[in-house]
Image: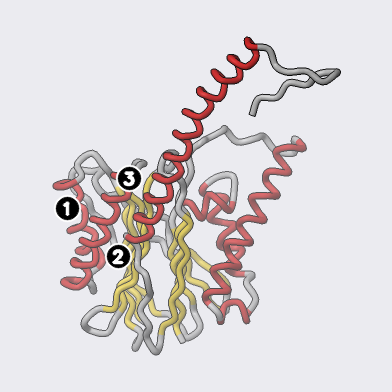
Amino acid sequence: MAVWFYDRPTAPAERQQRLAGLYCAAASRLIALEVKRERLRRTADTLRRGLLPDRLPRLPRVQLAARCLPAGLDGSHGSDWYDALQLPDGCLALSVGSVTGGGADCAAAMGRLRAALRAYAVLEGEDPVAVLGDLELLLKATEPARTATALYAYLDPATRRLSLAGAGHCPPLLVSSFGASFVETSLSAPLGMLSCWEAPSVELRADRGDLLLLYTEGLARRCGPSLHAGQLRLRSAAASAPRDVRHDLEHFCSYLLDACESERDSDRVGDRDGSRPAPEADTREDDIVLLAARFV
């Protein structure tokens, strides 16, 4: 809208009318582009969410909950996924991961990798290293210009046995009555980065009431000014969650997101008042993915 103010009643001159017309013509083109951009963003976001599970498996001895807050496609670091699959032997396959790059093509690549990982989990799900090794071979063959981080976990609800392996991904958290600790699965490079990918697997046994928390880098970065600081704050938030919150996984996921948001707000206050140096500006964003499993 173009507005002129006058001291007394009058009408715009011919030159002013022509100027307003030129302004509106230029503005209408920009508005049309923004409307088109918003429609594309919504369509891409819908497509992206459609690549993730629409529901989680229901098992008698394991509870599951997940959160996914996708970043904008144009300025994102990559495209993240989570997945939970009940295997033919009655066990559970859980995975989270991130494919590097931005845009709709990156989201499509994420969907293809997630679908392939499901197939490998059905075939050899009890061996996390084999599952991720096959995924890397596929990545190199079909997406040679990309890399990806991934974490795969095999859960046996009957024995509460866990077998995990990671490829350059954030280590998961095991939350018990004694606190929260990292399960070290990040002693390897991301998929597609080395000529030959190798990683150790980790095996452990959980107790009833224990929580396994899988997440992507976006959640840790949301919790603090750096990845390492964010991981430590995430562990602290998980360990300090009240007992009733831990018993309700949906509430537990919301609790962690709220706690991380509070930490980020406090960091912003500290940056403004000069108590700590402001981080370098980064216009890119991270997806936030969280997958939690509780043994009952």
Q: Distance between the residues labelled 1 and 3?
A: 20 Å
Q: Name the residue under label 2.
A: 201
Give the residue at x 70% y 16%: 12
Above or below, 274 against 262 in this view is above
Above or below, 262 against 238 in this view is above
Number of the label disc, if any, that sits on residue 104: 3
> Residue 114 appears at what percent x and percent y?
27, 60
Q: Which of marks 1 and 2 is nearer the N terminus?
A: 1
The reply, left or right, for residue 113 in relation to residue 237 is: left
Q: How far apart are marks 1 and 2 (CA)?
A: 20 Å
- Residues packed near mark 1 inside 10 Å, few (<14), some (14 to 19) or many (20 plus): some
> Residue 271 appears at what percent x and percent y?
70, 38
Q: What element carries label 3?
A: helix
> Residue 142 appears at what percent x and percent y?
16, 47
Instruction: Answer whether labels 1 and 3 touch (C-beta < 8 Å).
Output: no
Can residue 202 be seen from the camera position used here?
Answer: no
Q: Distance between the residues labelled 2 and 3?
A: 33 Å
